[in-house]
Amino acid sequence: MTPDSGSLVSLDGIHKTFFTRHFFYRENDDARRRIYVKKEVHAAQDINIDIAPGKIFGLLGPNGAGKTTTVKMISGLVKPDKGAVWVEGINVEKSRKEILKRIGVVLEGTRTTIWPLTPMENLRYYGNLKNVRGSVLKKRAHELLDFIGLSEKKDVQVRHMSRGQKQKLAICIALIADPKVILLDEPTTGLDVQSSRAIKDKIIEMTREHGKAVLVTTHDMHVAQELCDTIGIIDQGKLVTCKPMNELIEVFSESVFEFRVDEAPLLDPLRAIPGVVQAEVENGNQSNTKLLVLHLTPKEEFRSEALYNVVTHLRDCGIQLHSINQRQQNLESVFLQLTTSSI
């Protein structure tokens, strides 16, 4: 298949499986070993993603869900078992060297920095690899180090820098060739508040003003909610949802309602009402009240009937109803509802 013509990044039915093997030694003189356990791990299962110019895509998921593997497949560092990845209309598998020149990548753990070199030497090295040379390279390197707050460290070996400073340098390396596609795996890890704010502002500026396509993976739900236009949540290698940020939160907000009552009702009769998906009681902020929280079906025609039946049930039980509110969700609560394990 050909990629979406309006996207800078397209993933078409990507699938990747890893096999892990554990060995143990036989208890004899030759100490031969044999396979003890062989396990199949699905890091990506039929994932489809499109990122258009000027958009930030957030890929979220628990540890081991497949986020970093997906980033590596886009950058050509890992080959998918099936499916295709396209960057700027180019098939990544067929033109890996060309793709590496066209994207900027920040992998978690500052693994792109070369520790025996200085920040300036790192930027010159990676700039030359991506055909950025001469006065353009020198000017861009100084501008990036000034922006990121590393100008005073430009001639210090990376091995002597802090983890946060190495993370800043990794971001500079990703931007040295001014790529149209930027892949950021946990970009704010290890950064102080000021640096994190500067990075987020830079990401927004590059995307909105210069039409870049950005993919961000992060465990920080606040970063994702602030930055991303579209959210994809991956769990156990499967993309469980992929929606625009506002639409994703709105869908889940519609189905959660808070009933402030004077006493806690029995939950099993409420759960038996058609359209009620989940029921729980929380302590109210006001004295002598309880907060009954109900998750209702997202289908509007059934949700309305469920609300009427809940109110009728509370009245029949002699429970005083103080108020009804629709709970506004945030990205963290949506994430926890959609994944089988927490961060």
Image (tube, helix red, strand yellow):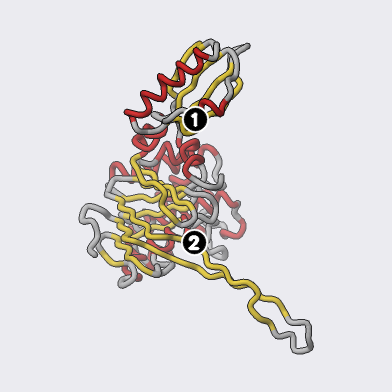
Residue 68 point in image, percent of width and height: 47, 58
Q: Quadrant of the C terminus?
A: top right
Q: Residue at x 34, y 36 (%)?
A: 247
Tag 1 secondary structure: loop
Question: In the figure, is residue 27 to the left or right of 319?
Answer: right
Q: Residue at x 41, y 56 (%)?
A: 174
Question: In the figure, is residue 85 to the left or right of 222?
Answer: left
Q: Residue at x 50, y 57 (%)?
A: 119
Looking at this view, is 130 or 253 the one in front? 253
Question: In the figure, is residue 247 to the left or right of 125?
Answer: left
Q: Nearer the viewer, mark 1 or mark 2?
A: 1
Q: Amino acid at mark 2?
A: Thr
Viewer can see residue 90: yes
* Mark positioned earlier in the residue sequence (1 or 2): 2
Q: Amino acid at mark 1?
A: Ala
Viewer can see residue 131: no
Asked if 329 appears above or below 315 in the picture, the reply is below
Asked if 318 appears above or below 92 in the picture, the reply is above
Question: What residue is shown with label 1?
Answer: 272
Question: What residue is shown with label 2?
Answer: 112
Looking at this view, is 6 or 152 the one in front? 6
Residue 292: image quadrant is top right
Q: Residue at x 30, y 49 (%)?
A: 212
Residue 218 point in image, percent of width and height: 48, 47
* Cα–Cα gap, marks 1 and 2: 55 Å
Q: How packed is label 1: few (under 14 Cα within 10 Å), some, or many (20 or more)?
A: few
